[in-house]
């Protein structure tokens, strides 16, 4: 047992280190990130983390932070592991001086862990388009934001895209739409929505689970080859995506009838399959490519000074841009909080207010150097999902580029709204939450 | 000089049969318990409770359970993750059915449910041994996790298949969920684990434990001297699964708060607990605690040292941590193949002679 004591003393000493190290300087805004640069999902976690770090460095270098207040970036390595995520969260949540202003876990599992804690610790969670879908109901989840669109909205958007290709909602009748999903909380998210859609529009739905991490999919695709669905949707992550695309190519499933969720549509996923991936589709809510004014600023102010987190030529990849849009909205929420509360020394609770009345329209996007990058959003007290619009992008294997091939679809709220209401109320009942009133 | 039993005479049978016959050991253990129960709860904060001490205690309990089966009875099991899942899901369903019943009773019943499941999956041990048994328990791992993932009843048909703990009060004090204070969670876990550890220590010293060890050392000889393999092996499976089930219930209820079967209870979890007892020491109660400390605390310690102490980038630290942990495991197993508990024993023997080794 002396070892235990020894480790205890050593841990205590290490934990005490930062206390002496941090001087009481000027106020700083703490933006933490839960990164995963290790583990099976690292290829996806790295561009997300790089974008966060680059944007924060850009603001600190170019503008001196947010409205002149420096940003302190605190990162913690989770390896996409829930237990490590909990340790990280406890470690960083009270970072001085402002405490963690908003948490972006980039993991459904960790988000579920943190949702109940958010209300008690009073730290807003911005689970951008992932995590618990019913957190869109701001009356039950005042501390959680999942704009710009949930998985359920996305499922309805993808089905609308399919209907457009088939010639209208009515022609969905009798079609076979299969879902290949990561067998986890994340992958199961769209099932209920797809079941509701199948019932309403009369298509045949079937879910085919793939176990973590997803390297073994032969049986799944054999089944698809045998049963010949008209369309295959995929809710995959990490190595599962590339394996699925390769397997689909090997059974000659038409790529333009294979649509991934927006987490299954990055360069990492399609490049390994080479030319065979040409025409593969995926959901998207922002553009790909590194030609926006913001990217130029990042190259100039961050990479030219040698402060870049990743490779210069990987700026503008889909997941890099996903990270950028996430940190951009977080920063705008902090800016909004400063405006509402009239102080630059914002707290996490103020940032929550900033999220709740956040409005980033097209004009503001252009100011930020992201003209036509994504659509405008407006968050309200009862709707934390925002507009919920999703488009479909397509991979061009020759040019090695993603491009949008559809309009932004509005979600079918008549399908998702009752499901969100049901699930959020079940949460409220189990956890004795009284839904607040929004007026 | 300080650690010597000179002059400590045992004048009664009960003194001879005490758990810690040497006074210094007694004082040491009572001291640790006093600190754990009376000092730590007053200084504990959320980081120490949720990230360090509660996982440590929960994994120590799971290690203890597996050690009873593998270390004391010699039956290799790779189904620990699944048995933890049984405990977790049983407690989840029971709290749903009987919200007004005391949580401690429900955790106890969850342990009993796990024990029953463990006995069922322990039946093959009567015919197969060693690595073959490990494969049979592997079946438990895959089957049970598949079941919890497949059948909606187990997770109350939640759309994501996740189970989330309800807020539970234990005699008016909240012990689960985010509103529970760190001290309450810690004390609740510690009390259960201290009691179960004491029970385990006494079981393995008694008739039942001796029959397990006889089976472990040579099952044919054990049978010849009158030990029934059926009873001995299945009782080991039952007791071990009970401990692992309680650990699973605490792992889900007090430590994590929500869980999905494939991530929280997958095969890696089984290996994790197996490594705890191999590194800590097979067939030792203390070993489970030392092993859990090694496996749970060391990565956190290394991370905090590298990131907080030396300013290493967190991603690099993550990679170095994996390397270092692997190297340390190999180092300790070469230095002492019988685990950390054996190291501690050697230290004690040396201490008895110190400072005059001859």
Image: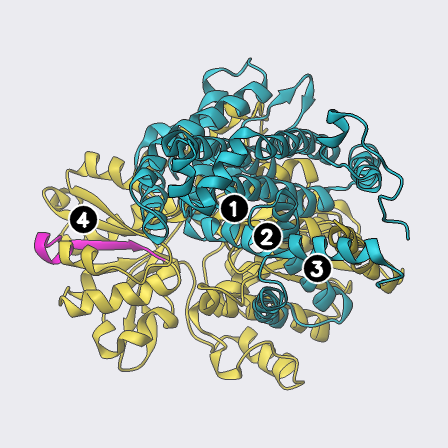
Find the distance from the CA under tag 2 to the CA under tag 4: 53 Å
Q: Colour of chain A?
A: yellow
Chain letter for mark 4, please. A
Residue at the (87%, 44%) spot, across then down: B6
| Residue wearing tag 1 | B71
Q: Tell me, yes or no, whether dots 2 and 3 are on the same chain.
A: yes
Do labels 2 and 1 touch, CB within 8 Å?
Answer: yes
Secondary structure category for the residue under label 2: loop
Query: Quadrant location of the C terminus of chain B?
Result: bottom right
Circle 2 Cα neighbour tier, 10 Å, few/some/many (<14 / 14–19 / ≥20) = many
Do labels 2 and 3 touch, CB within 8 Å?
Answer: no
Q: Is residue A52 left or right of residue B93?
A: right
Q: Which mark is residue A245?
A: none
| Residue wearing tag 4 | A177
| Residue wearing tag 3 | B301
Q: Is residue A284 left or right of residue B282?
A: left
Q: Is residue A306 located in the magenta-colored stretch of the structure?
A: no
Relative vertical location of residue A420 with respect to residue A336 in this rendering, above or below: above
Relative vertical location of residue B1 with respect to residue A267 in this rendering, above or below: above
Q: Position of residue A381 (x, y in %)?
A: 57, 36
Task: Label the cyan chain with its letter.
Answer: B
| Residue wearing tag 2 | B281
- Asked whether A56 or B233 is in front, the reply is B233
Q: Earlier in the sequence, mark 2 or mark 3?
A: 2
Circle 3 Cα neighbour tier, 10 Å, few/some/many (<14 / 14–19 / ≥20) = many
Secondary structure category for the residue under label 3: helix
Chain letter for mark 3, please. B
Asked if residue A43 shows in the view, the reply is yes
The magenta segment is A224-236
Circle 4 Cα neighbour tier, 10 Å, few/some/many (<14 / 14–19 / ≥20) = many
Secondary structure category for the residue under label 1: helix
Q: How is the image coloured?
A: by chain
């Amino acid at each position: 047992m002396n070892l235990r004591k020894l480790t205890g003393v050593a841990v205590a000493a290490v934990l005490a280190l930062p206390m002496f190290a941090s001087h009481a300087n000027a106020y700083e805004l703490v933006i933490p990130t839960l990164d995963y640069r290790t583990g099976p999902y690292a290829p996806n976690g790295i561009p997300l983390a790089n974008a966060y770090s680059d944007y924060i460095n850009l603001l600190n270098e170019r503008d001196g932070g947010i409205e002149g207040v420096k940003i302190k970036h605190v990162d913690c390595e989770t390896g996409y592991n829930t237990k490590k995520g909990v340790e990280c969260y406890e470690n960083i949540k009270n970072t001085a001086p402002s405490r963690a202003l908003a948490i972006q876990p980039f993991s459904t599992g960790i988000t579920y862990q943190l949702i109940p804690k958010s209300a008690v610790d009073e730290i807003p969670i911005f689970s951008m388009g992932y995590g618990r879908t019913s957190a869109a109901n701001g009356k039950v989840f005042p501390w959680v934001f999942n704009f710009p669109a949930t998985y359920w909205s996305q499922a309805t958007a993808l089905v609308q895209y399919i209907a457009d290709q088939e010639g209208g909602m009515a022609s969905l009748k009798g079609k076979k739409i299969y879902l290949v999903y990561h067998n986890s909380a994340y992958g199961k998210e769209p099932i209920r929505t797809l079941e509701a859609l199948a019932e309403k529009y009369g298509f045949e739905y079937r879910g085919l689970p793939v176990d973590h991490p997803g390297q073994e999919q032969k049986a799944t695709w054999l089944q698809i080859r045998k049963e010949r669905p008209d369309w295959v949707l995929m809710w995959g992550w990490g190595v599962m995506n590339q394996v699925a695309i390769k397997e689909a190519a090997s059974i000659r499933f038409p790529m333009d009838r294979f649509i991934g969720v927006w987490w299954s549509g990055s360069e990492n996923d399609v490049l390994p399959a080479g030319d065979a991936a040409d025409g593969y589709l995926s959901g998207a809510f922002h553009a790909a490519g590194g030609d926006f004014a913001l990217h130029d600023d990042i190259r100039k102010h961050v990479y030219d000074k040698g402060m870049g987190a990743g490779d210069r030529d990987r700026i503008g990849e889909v997941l890099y841009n996903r990270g950028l849009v996430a940190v951009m909205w977080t920063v705008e929420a902090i800016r909004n909080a400063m405006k509402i509360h009239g102080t630059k020394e914002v707290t996490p609770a103020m940032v929550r207010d900033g999220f709740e009345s956040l409005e980033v329209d097209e004009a503001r996007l252009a100011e930020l150097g992201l003209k036509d990058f994504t659509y405008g959003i407006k968050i309200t007290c009862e709707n934390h999902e925002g507009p919920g619009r999703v488009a479909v992008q397509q991979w061009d294997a020759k040019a090695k580029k993603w491009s949008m091939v559809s309009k932004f679809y509005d979600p079918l709220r008549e399908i998702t709204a009752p499901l969100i209401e049901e699930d959020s109320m079940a949460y409220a009942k189990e956890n004795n939450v009284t839904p607040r009133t929004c007026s | 000089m300080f650690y010597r039993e000179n002059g400590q005479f045992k004048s009664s049978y009960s003194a001879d049969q005490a758990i810690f016959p040497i006074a210094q050991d007694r004082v040491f253990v009572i001291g640790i318990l006093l600190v754990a129960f009376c000092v730590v709860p007053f200084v504990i904060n959320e980081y120490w409770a949720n990230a360090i001490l509660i996982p440590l205690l929960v994994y120590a309990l799971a290690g203890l359970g597996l050690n009873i089966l593998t270390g004391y009875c010699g039956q290799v099991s790779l189904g620990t993750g699944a048995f933890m899942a049984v405990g977790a899901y049983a407690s989840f369903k029971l709290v749903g059915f009987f919200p007004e019943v005391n949580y401690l009773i429900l955790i106890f019943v969850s342990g009993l449910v796990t024990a029953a499941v463990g006995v069922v999956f322990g039946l093959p041990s009567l015919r197969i041994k060693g690595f073959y048994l490990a494969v049979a328990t592997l079946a438990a791992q895959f089957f049970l996790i598949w079941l919890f993932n497949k059948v909606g009843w187990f997770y109350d048909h939640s759309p994501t298949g996740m189970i989330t703990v309800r807020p539970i009060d234990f005699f008016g004090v909240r012990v689960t969920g985010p509103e529970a204070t760190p001290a309450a969670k810690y004390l609740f876990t510690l009390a259960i684990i201290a009691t179960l550890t004491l029970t385990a220590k006494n079981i393995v010293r008694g008739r039942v434990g001796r029959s397990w060890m006889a089976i472990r050392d040579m099952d044919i000889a054990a049978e010849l001297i009158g030990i029934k393999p059926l009873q001995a092996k299945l009782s080991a499976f039952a007791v071990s699964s009970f401990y692992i089930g309680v650990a699973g219930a605490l792992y889900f209820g007090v430590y994590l708060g929500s869980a999905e079967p494939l991530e929280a209870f997958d095969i890696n979890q089984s290996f994790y607990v197996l490594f705890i007892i191999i590194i800590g020491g097979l067939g030792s109660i203390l070993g489970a605690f030392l092993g859990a400390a090694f496996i749970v605390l060391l990565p956190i310690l290394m991370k905090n040292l590298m990131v907080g102490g030396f300013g290493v980038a967190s991603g690099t630290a993550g990679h170095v941590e994996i390397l270092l942990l692997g190297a340390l495991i190999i180092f300790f197993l070469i230095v002492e193949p019988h685990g950390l508990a054996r190291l501690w024993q050697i230290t004690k023997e040396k201490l008895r002679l110190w400072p005059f080794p001859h």
